[in-house]
Image (cartoon, rainbow, N blue to C red):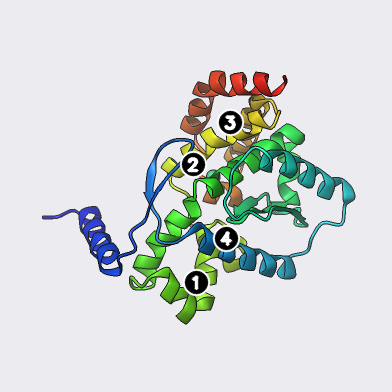
Amino acid sequence: MLKKSVITRSFLGVVFLALGIAACYTNPETGRRAMILFSTKQEAALGFSAFAELKREKPISTNPEQTELVRRVGNRISSVVELPHAEWEFVAFKDDEIPNAFCLPGGKVGIYTGILPFTQDEAGLAMVMGHEVAHAVARHGGERMSQQLLVGLGGIGLAVAMREKPAETQALALVAYGVATTVGVILPYSRKHELEADYMGLKFMAKAGYDPRAGVEFWRRFKAYSDQRGGKPPEFLSTHPLDDRRIREMEKHMPEAMEIYRRSQG
Ligand SMILES: [Zn+2]
């Protein structure tokens, strides 16, 4: 008997073939290859419109300290990464109850003020932002959305979906990119995606001149807070599942990250 995953995989294979749009993306930092159904330009377009909608719906912080901090760290992180079609924007959303953050394709970064008590300083925020930007650079949202489209929208291609089902596609984009509050659906990143984003995020923050050791400290603080809540992780950790292995892996990457950090200090 065939396992379900095998069936799903062959089903996806047939759909890719039928549509003739199979696209393979190779992560520039890790070399991992992923199937992504659409172009970085289409991804960015979705990011732009989803972000514009969020800005209309969610209150934005008017605290100059918060908005400046988010912009300053964002500028430093974005200056060391390559993201196609990026029109970078760093917005502090006013929501002290929800510790959360995301980066949409096209370089649209949202930081909820509720995460700032955990990030504590610039380096902590640089870790969060580096991690989120890494998800975008690695196109993890695009990879998840490709899978969801094929399954959820009955295997039709993105171009068709965007034309015929704009509302569903938009909602799906938000889910795939981890902007769960708006649509009320949580779609966690896989462990593979989390480990990849941790590794890339550490390197990005180090390259931007932030001490990567402070980044790991942030994850430790956040995990301790989550553990205290007893099985009900904050939203950010629902979409970015955090366990001891992730922290151990980051420690393994520390010598490489420290080397990058030292070089950034000139
Ligand atoms: Zn993540």
Q: Is residue 266 above or below residue 96?
A: above
Are dots 4 and 1 in contact, CB under 8 Å? no
- At mark 3, the secondary structure is helix
| Residue placed most toward the observer, 97 or 128 | 128
> How far is the residue under mark 4 from the one under mark 1?
13 Å
User: Disc 3 or disc 2, which is closer to the eye?
Assistant: 3
- At mark 2, the secondary structure is helix
> How far is the residue under mark 1 from the one under mark 3?
32 Å
- At mark 1, the secondary structure is helix
4 or 3: tag closer to the N-terminus: 4
**Residue 217, x across and y down, in percent:** 65, 28
Name the residue that disc number 3 marks: 203
Q: Is residue 83 above or below residue 212?
A: below
Instruction: Give the numbered dot on residue 194.
Output: 2
| Residue placed most toward the observer, 29 or 236 | 29
Residue type beneath disc 4: Ala
Within 10 Å of disc 1 (Cα), the crowding (few <14, some 14-19, many 20+) is: many
Q: Is residue 128 above or below residue 156?
A: above
User: Disc 4 or disc 3, which is closer to the eye?
Assistant: 4
Q: Is mark 4 within 8 Å of ligand 1?
A: no
Residue type beneath disc 3: Lys
- At mark 4, the secondary structure is helix
1 or 3: tag closer to the N-terminus: 1
Q: Is residue 188 visible?
A: no
Name the residue that disc number 4 marks: 44
Q: Is mark 2 within 8 Å of ligand 1?
A: yes
> How far is the residue under mark 4 from the one under mark 2?
21 Å
Is residue 15 left or right of 171 when viewed as pictured? left
1 or 2: tag closer to the N-terminus: 1
Name the residue that disc number 1 marks: 169
Residue name at image x 87 percent, y 45 percent: 65
Are dots 1 and 3 in contact, CB under 8 Å? no
